Amino acid sequence: MSASRALLLLVVAMLLHLVTCTTTTTTSTATTHHNTITKAKTKTSSYPDFQLLNVKQAITETKIRPLKPSLYQELSMNIPNDSGSEGKQKLKLVHRDKVSFNNKFHNHSHVFHARMQRDLKRVVSLIRRVSSGSTASYGVEDFGSEVDNAGCNSGRCRYEVSYGDGSSTKGTLALETLTLGRTVVQNVAIGCGHMNQGMFVGAAGLLGLGGGSMSFVGQLSRERGNAFSYCLVSRVTNSNGFLEFGSEAMPVGAAWIPLIRNPHSPSYYYIGLSGLGVGDMKVPISEDIFELTELGNGGVVMDTGTAVTRFPTVAYEAFRDAFIDQTGNLPRASGVSIFDTCYNLFGFLSVRVPTVSFYFSGGPILTLPANNFLIPVDDAGTFCFAFAPSPSGLSILGNIQQEGIQISVDGANEFVGFGPNVC
């Protein structure tokens, strides 16, 4: 299979769950060399204190069966990717759990627990990597993964890479010509895997979007600009998400916040978080808890490979308790997996729940829909508060909370944008 065909059939290995999201900000306009963008003012606008969670629809969606691999490949080949202008390329994204390789994955509870097991491995690996500081060589961090073993002999270069969820690949490094729509990119360094385990099974490959120069985004930066935009969707929706490359993919009307770089972990994208909101209140949490220190500890990482958002224990407990205080009318259920705050919503059509919001440094407030923070963990009506404590000072903004909202990373100008589009 050619590299271009492999890329078109790529099943991006991300853990997703639900859909739709809204942002509420007050913005001002600024112009850069590549586009007109909006940067948030300090003042923020109001947002709803409560919203409705459609319980019946959420439970129904847990019973939707995923596509067989052959059907997904036919869909991918029959629906071409969108290509805009020369500097803007768009790929379709499909949730990894939307494609079934085993009948046992039709059970939502099994899928959920498998996802949580992968998530725990991912978080442990991520924390270990960012906590190791500068002990790893620059080349390894540049690659965006852990190269255990690399070297060249007789003109052939080998590699071994392990990933946070336990997946691994071994093979030969190569230079390839890749095609995105009408754009041809030559001499892209890729790994040609001969021995692959984990998320590589059933997929054409893995697309690295980290901040290192050897990631796919880094290698495209000269031709397309160091920028990309994406929107993640749930496995149970019939729609597709999208992934766009190039500076022209940066949307007008997004709420922009500064991109923070950690020199000790350059492949990760950090953002500034000043607080958390539940209902009409900002939870009393010190902003220092979310700060990135000069030694590279703490901070808030945006990570599409992590499903569940984590906060340091002190922050999480205050956040969780504020949510419990405002959901006292809902019947509780026992904790499930990594979740300690769950509810028995069997028999409900819909329930009223408090709004959950992220206060970003600089002023913007990201207000989440109910589906992005109260999620079904089985098909019997058990819903859980989709956050967990971090075993370290690191906070991780996972993909469940990112779902349904366009997120843009402008690496050249050091900004991250939320909105204005949804999927």
Image: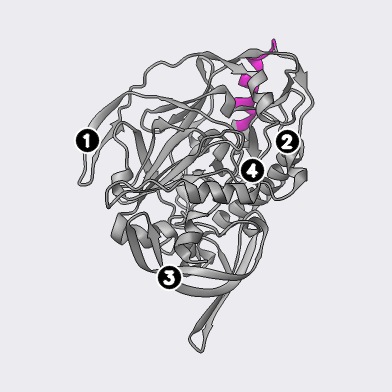
Q: Which residue is mark 3?
A: 176
Query: What predominant SS class does the magenta segment belong to?
Result: helix
Question: Depth-wise, is mark 4 or mark 1 nearer the camera?
Answer: 4
Q: Is residue 291 magenta?
A: no
Residue at (67% x, 58% y) in the render: 198
Left or right, 81 with respect to 133, comes to left
Residue at (25% x, 28% y) in the render: 28
Residue 387 is situated, as x and y percent measured from the top left of the image, at 63, 33
**Which sits in the foreground, 376 or 180?**
180
Mark 3: which amino acid?
Answer: Glu
Left or right, 406 with respect to 184, comes to right
Residue at (42% x, 48% y) in the render: 81
Q: Which residue is mark 2?
A: 108
Residue 25 is situated, as x and y percent measured from the top left of the image, at 36, 24
The segment highlighted magenta reads: 316-329
Residue 270 is situated, as x and y percent measured from the top left of the image, at 45, 45
Mark 4: which amino acid?
Answer: Leu
Left or right, 194 with respect to 259, comes to right
Gap between marks 4 and 1, in whole Å? 44 Å
Q: Are marks 4 and 3 in contact (CB under 8 Å)?
A: no
Does label 4 or label 1 sit earlier along the sequence? 1
Mark 2: which amino acid?
Answer: His
Q: Neighbour class for label 2 at 10 Å: few (<14), some, many (≥20)? A: many
Gap between marks 2 and 4, in whole Å? 14 Å
Q: Which residue is mark 4?
A: 67
